[in-house]
Image (spheres, rainbow, N blue to C red):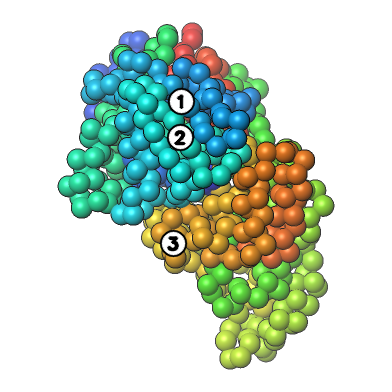
Amino acid sequence: MGPTVKRNLASFGLIFTIAGLCLGLVLAGCGAGATKKVVVVGMLGDVETLNPILSENSNETEVMNGIFSTLLKMNDRLEMEPDLLTKMPELSPDRLTYTFQLRQGVKFHDGVELTAEDVEFLYRMKLAEGNLVPSRDMWEAIEKFEIIDKYNFRITLKKPDVTWLQGWCYGEGMIPPKHLLEKEFAASGGALTKGGPFSRHPVGTGPYMFVEWKRDQHILLKRNPHYFREGKPKIEKIVFKVIPDTNTMLAQFKKGEIDVFSQAQANQYKELLEMKKKGHAIAVHKFPSYTYLHADFNLRNPIFQDKRVRQALCYAFPKEDFIRTVLDGVATPADSYIAPMSWAYNPNVKKYDYNLAKAMQLLEEAGWKLRDDGVRVKDGRELAFRISTNTENRTRTKFVEIAKQAWEAVGARVTIQNYEGTTLFGDILEKGNFDIIVFAWVSGADPDGYTLWYSKQDPLVYGAGQNYVGYKNDRIDRLCLAGKEEFDQEKRLRIYHEIQEILAEEVPYMFVYFYNNVAAVKSSLKNFKPNPTMANNTWNIYDWELGN
């Protein structure tokens, strides 16, 4: 979360059978029967790393769900269930100490057994100062990590945290091998990097083993014959094929060049339904999700430090028309970071329905006066800024174009500067090199937004976190902490309602819409179960099977 970035971010990936396609050397020797053994997944844009310690991109989670395992999984019913554990962890009466029991005999792909030391090593790597991890929130909550024996360990938190356990379900909690990474960590002077050896050649305990990664082309995985779950993986090879354009991806899906249209856009839903109606043997899924598109204001920019400017830009954007015309209505308007299907959603927050007159009024009140050429100025400075998104996503680039027109209509001078995904979510987002940035977060089922809104989650100041906009609000800080510590859901409800009210007034983000995720796969894929959280749709890739 999320990139789509892993809280980030945005889009889910799926998988399906290859229809007579040979991807150069990857699938050399495709012949009779190959369609039963290989699955090709379309993936928008390449990844930066396959090291779960450093990852925060949902595309990376899509791939890494095949390579790594987690202590727990979040299933498609939004329930936690054991993965590397034999049972759900035991929680002490004071809600501070969790006791975990690992499965015995689980092997990494190189044959070395996974033990409690590997889990403890992940904890240490997440806290190591040199490692640029997306967030240390989950790990800094730990007071003590005790290894009881080879398969049992105990974790004591500094204070109760109702949100803490679910982190072990997602990419954040994927377990890498200590025996490989501690050597890389030491050799690099105490700093793992996204360009390091393990990032390019990962080893896990998951259902599939890494084979190769050809930059901007594909990532190839093969079945792990020693996978610890019963039944073993049924699919021989998985190919994640990079296709940096959603229209091209749809065209390749129609031709059978990919088997899973993993990141279908809302405005392609009707076309996919029409394909099915015409006899294509496909299954089309549309389901609500916790993924939302947002436009983020860099609050370090003096222009955006006045909330009236941010509010004005929200009023000036025709959100409902955008959803109707660009997305064919296949989305839910967003006024919060919490999805309307969540128990914590506040339906009464301030709304920013399209209102050009209100936008103009707010800008005038903020001291931005119209010049003869139609551009607003204040103290000799123009109301000028850049807006950026990733080039691979046509919906987002369309949003940026419409936002430019809408905001110039109220007196702004807007420059579009888009980037490839790896650049946008690397040099631009992570280093704060943006004015307004547009992408999507995908979050878990819990309403906790600590890493986004808590002031000390600003990575430019504190080295970790996802508060990339530099948002600071003392009341929000107190509420974020209270929401994590409160186990009574009614009391939590009141906390998150207030958080949403404050954010709706201060708009550090312009919330645009919640995705109705759309995915199309061949109907012969068995056990594909869409997952609306940042577990992503490959959460149960070990259980997929190809029928006739």
Residue under pointer 2? 155
Give the residue displayed 62% in from the left and 45% down from the top: 484
Closer to the camera, 376 or 478? 478
Q: How many angstroms separate mark 2 from mark 3 (CA)?
A: 25 Å
Q: Nearer the viewer, mark 2 or mark 3?
A: 2
Label 1 sits on residue: 100
Which one is nearer the viewer's eye here, 514 or 411?
A: 514
Left or right of 45 on screen, residue 180 = left
- Say what secondary structure mark 3 lies in: helix
Residue 145 sits in which quadrant? top left
Q: Is residue 228 above or below residue 147?
A: above
| Residue drawn 79% across the image and 66% down it | 355
Say few, some or many: other residues with alpha carbon within 10 Å of mark 1 (under 14 / 14 to 19 / 20 or more). many
Q: Earlier in the sequence, mark 2 or mark 3?
A: 2
The earlier-in-sequence mark between 1 and 3 is 1
Q: Point out the tag, 1 or 2, that comes first from the N-terminus.
A: 1
Q: CA distance from mark 1 to mark 3?
A: 31 Å
> Which circle marks residue 394 in the picture?
none
**Residue type (three-letter) at the residue carrying disc 2:** Ile
Image point (61%, 52%), residue name:
481
The mark lying in front, picked from 1 and 3, is 1
Q: Nearer the viewer, residue 423 or 164?
A: 164
317 left or right, relative to 164: right
Give percent across and percent down for residue 323: 70, 49
Whole-percent x and y of residue 204? 32, 28
Q: Amino acid at mark 1?
A: Phe
How many callouts does the rendering have? 3
**Residue 456 seen in the current view:** yes
Measured in 3D between alpha carbons, the distance from the residue under mark 1 to the one under mark 2, in whole angstroms, is: 8 Å
Q: Is residue 348 left or right of residue 443?
A: right
**Contact, CB < 8 Å: mark 1 with mark 2?**
yes
The percent position of residue 252, horizontal first and vertical second, equals 46, 33
